């Protein structure tokens, strides 16, 4: 059996989950991500930021250095570092660390608003967690499979709010707050999504009747995207279970978190 190089060992720890060291690394990284987000949230509270400015600053730079080392290490041990740097998670890793360095090199009080905006981009660190959620890929594949149906659904909703908004503009008019068709379409979107801000309301009988129809329609269509995604998710999970086969009796259909065969009790191969 060939001996692994130091680079390959590091790759197994950082990118793999089959070893104890790899699992411990993932757990430690999740804790670091959540802790850094807690620091970001606390730093936005003026009372906390005023009382502990240095502590928050040191903590932020500590996490920034840790994530920088992690990113460099990933590039070092990756078989294709350029491909990783251009991948989704590679870009997220950069977004997680680069705001702190940009803010550090932009002096002057005139740029404080820009720095504040850049610092908020640290929230992208939370997207790194998707890498460690076991079933996140199933959800992503379900959304990808349902994207055409969802697009058709949103297109239909867009047509409906345009029609209802235009009708409300004709019925109510500028005197009742419906000053333009875009403004009326905004009302239709707010109403059909059952948000109901109340900043624009119909006053005429016909307007109230149309508003009632719009509200009822809103409740009717709320379940459509949920049903689409649920159906695709169910199909994807069924497909995923079919791939988990027992090496002893070849039985398929196991749950994604199953460790042993439901028929013969043989330990199942590791799966993600």
Image (spheres, grey):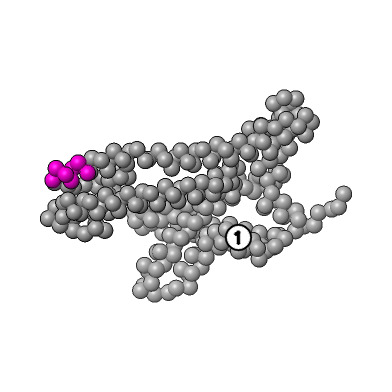
Spot occupied by residue 23 in the image (x, y as percentages of width and height): 66, 44
> Is 166 above or below relative to 136?
below
x and y, in percent, of residue 114 in the image: 39, 68
Q: Secondary structure at mark 1?
A: loop
Q: Position of residue 173 (x, y in %)?
A: 16, 55
Residue 31 appears in the rendering: no
Q: Which residue is most to the right?
A: 1
Which residue is located at x 71 percent, y 39 percent? 270
Residue 210 in the image: state x and y as whole percent: 22, 44
* 168, above or below 251, in the image: below
State left or right for residue 141 relative to residue 21: left
Closer to us: 58 or 40: 40
Q: Which residue is mark 1?
A: 87
Question: To which quarter of the image does residue 195 belong?
Answer: top left
Q: Is residue 81 left or right of residue 249?
A: left
Magenta stretch: dominant secondary structure: helix
């Amino acid at each position: 059996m060939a001996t692994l190089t130091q680079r390959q060992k590091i790759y197994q720890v950082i990118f793999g989950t089959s070893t104890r060291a790899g699992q411990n690394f993932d757990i430690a990284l999740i804790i670091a991500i959540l802790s850094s987000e807690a620091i970001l949230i606390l730093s936005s509270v003026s009372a906390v930021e005023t009382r502990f400015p240095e502590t928050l600053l040191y903590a932020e730079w500590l996490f920034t250095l840790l994530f920088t080392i992690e990113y460099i290490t990933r590039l070092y041990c990756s078989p294709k570092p350029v491909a990783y740097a251009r991948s989704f998670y590679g870009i997220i890793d950069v977004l997680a660390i680069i705001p702190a360095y940009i803010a550090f090199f932009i002096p002057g009080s005139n740029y404080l608003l820009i720095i504040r905006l850049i610092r908020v981009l640290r929230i992208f660190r939370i997207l790194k967690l998707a890498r460690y959620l076991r079933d996140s890929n199933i959800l992503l594949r379900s959304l990808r499979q349902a994207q055409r149906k969802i697009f058709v659904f949103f297109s239909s909703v867009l047509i409906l709010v345009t029609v209802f908004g235009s009708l409300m503009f004709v019925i109510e008019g500028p005197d009742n707050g419906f000053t333009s068709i875009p403004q009326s379409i905004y009302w239709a979107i707010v109403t059909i999504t059952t948000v109901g801000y109340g900043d624009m309301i119909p006053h005429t009988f016909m307007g109230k009747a149309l508003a009632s129809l719009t509200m009822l329609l809103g409740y009717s269509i709320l379940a459509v995207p949920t049903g689409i995604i649920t159906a695709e998710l169910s199909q994807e999970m069924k497909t995923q279970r079919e791939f988990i086969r027992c090496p002893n009796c070849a039985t398929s259909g196991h749950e994604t978190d199953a460790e042993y065969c439901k028929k013969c009790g043989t330990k199942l191969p590791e799966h993600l």
